[in-house]
Amino acid sequence: MNKKEIIRVLETIAVLLEIKGENTFKTAAYRRAAAALEQIEKSMDEIEDPSALKGIGKGTAQVISDCVTNGHSPLLEELEATIPPGLPPLLSLPGLGGKKIAKLSQELGIRDAATLKAACEQQKVRQLPGFGEKSELKILEALEKNEDTNQRLSYASVRTFAQRLLHEVCQLEGVEKAELGGSFRRTEETVKDLDMIVATKHAAGVSERLKTMDSVEEVIAGGEKKVTIRADHPSIQVDFRLVSPDEFAATLHHFTGSKEHNVRMRQIAKERAEKISEYGIETEHGLVVPESEEALYARYNLPWMPPEIRQGHKEFDLVERIPELLKLSHVRGDLHMHTTWSDGAHSVEEMALAAKARGYEYIVITDHSVSLRVANGLTSDRLRRQSEEIDRVNEQIGGIHIFKGTEMDILPDGSLDYEDDLLQEMDFVIASIHSSFQQSSDKIMQRLENALKNAHVDLIAHPTGRLIGRRDGYKVDVDALIHLASETNTALELNANPNRFDLHHSWLEKVIAAGVPISISTDAHSIEMLSDMEEGVRIARKAFAKPEQVLNTKSKNAFKQWINRPNLK
């Protein structure tokens, strides 16, 4: 585990101990240990003895050692096994922390969302000390909202499972190849279920093996052509379609969708007296089975369409632009990432080496600014010391350039977290909102305008502040934001983290139309998160972005020229 993951383990243990009703001294020990790791400007590879750090005792050091050595914590697993599984998810509800959940469990026998909702409806929660009528109504409102949306899961919440499941299926005896389809393959923000196409010449045997995989909680249907299961974690339905290798391309295309895209394809085929189905192409001479999706599209004089643009609308109207769309190979750098100096898992050098391994020409280190204390934001002195380290690493490693940057908070009163004289020392300045999301639209726009008009601000990060399925974001007038960005020649970010995908692709189309540069940035807090760039590129393609419209496709020298552009502010 990296440092970020270990911090999360320690914080989770603290919360679960609270839910269990343990004393505050015990829970505080794990929070102190998490804070101690967060504040040290080293990665786990650079920390020789965690127990020597101030704030880390014998018990917490053991947890850290378990995570480093074995990749898991027996203590965390023990706690998870002894606490009702429906209690930890309640932490996402407004006003509920570990202590309050413990009180709900002990006083009212709450075990999950259903029992909590019943208690709220019976007005029992308001009677407990520390709650009240308003708290109860907010909890009930949030529970009802979750019921309305829980039929779909966020892409981010199922991604790791889906990728692991695909790998597991590809290893099964008799499977020649497999691929995920549906809304997941199209990189939609939410998915209702997962579709997987499995090519095999031994459907009966593969069907039985699919039903006995470790992740299967329930077998809903189990034939030779289709197996439907419910996975255990996350709880999601998975439909496996078993086809011959020859049928694979046509079936994959059909079950990738979207429904509207498939309708348009069938209309195009109908004009040639043909019919496209999941089995192939029916012609007057019989069934034609395309050997690939590319061959299927080529039959109708169409370029291969990436799954993410298959919406049934613009991909056909703008078909001539498809070959010109942005590709991952066009990306030459990542402009937003964090290190152990703030709340990242890896050092400046480790992030640079990982980016170099991805073939990047440059990166920008953009740790948090001083006011974001929860993320160990850098004081002015620490930011200058980090600049010295960046100089050292630039001299030490070749083949990639590290630019000096910061992700600076736009404070609730509209002021910026650093003074201009310090910002002038940075190569690249990101401004973002991390607080006071409840402010009016006018106030939010005043804050953003102050940042956009600052001569040193190059990029507005995650411009709406949303977290998919968890937070709507703040009240931003995106049209006005785009206009201001155009006037001040400031870039806007497509945050590639699947929890954000912010800006949404519908807004990105307007950004592109206004001629405002886009930065596709991972906001990586670890080496592993650098790979989110792939999803970011897919979201940009939904907006039909071309390479020249994306800031971090520029060469290192061209990027330098852009950040030294004439001041229009």
Image (spheres, rainbow, N blue to C red):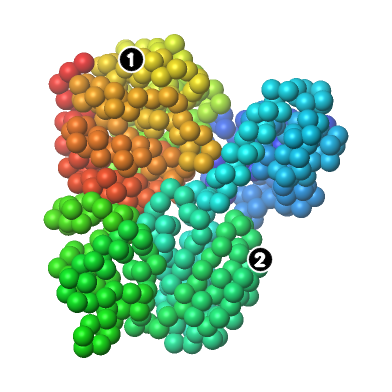
Label disc, if present, on residue 120 of the rendered structure: none
Q: Residue furthest right?
A: 107
Residue at figure coordinates x 32%, y 35% from the top left: 493
Report which quarter residue 488 is drawn in.
top left
Residue at figure coordinates x 21%, y 85% from the top left: 284
User: How dense is the environment of label 1, judged by Cα within 10 Å: few (below 14), some, or many (20 and up)?
Assistant: some
278 horizontally vs 17: left or right: left
Report which quarter residue 446 is drawn in.
top left
Q: Is residue 140 above or below residue 231?
A: above
232 horizontally vs 531: left or right: right
User: In the structure shown, which secondary structural element does the residue marked by tag 1 occupy?
Assistant: helix
Report which quarter residue 223 is drawn in.
bottom right
79 vs 184, nearest the viewer: 184
238 horizontally vs 189: left or right: right
Amino acid type, label 2: Glu
Q: Residue 170 appears at what percent x and percent y?
A: 47, 73
Q: Is residue 376 visible?
A: yes
Q: Is residue 306 above or below residue 222?
A: above
Q: Is residue 291 above or below residue 264?
A: below
448 vs 113, nearest the viewer: 113
Q: Residue 561 appears at what percent x and percent y?
A: 16, 31
Kindly indicate whether the residue at mark 2 contacts the one at mark 1 (C-beta within 8 angstroms): no
Q: Is residue 173 visible?
A: no
70 vs 175, nearest the viewer: 175
Residue on which the image places disc 1: 450
Q: Residue 527 appears at what percent x and percent y?
A: 44, 46
Residue at figure coordinates x 24%, y 24% from the top left: 483
Residue on which the image places disc 2: 217
Give the quadrant of the C terminus: top left
Q: Residue 272 appears at what percent x and percent y?
A: 17, 74
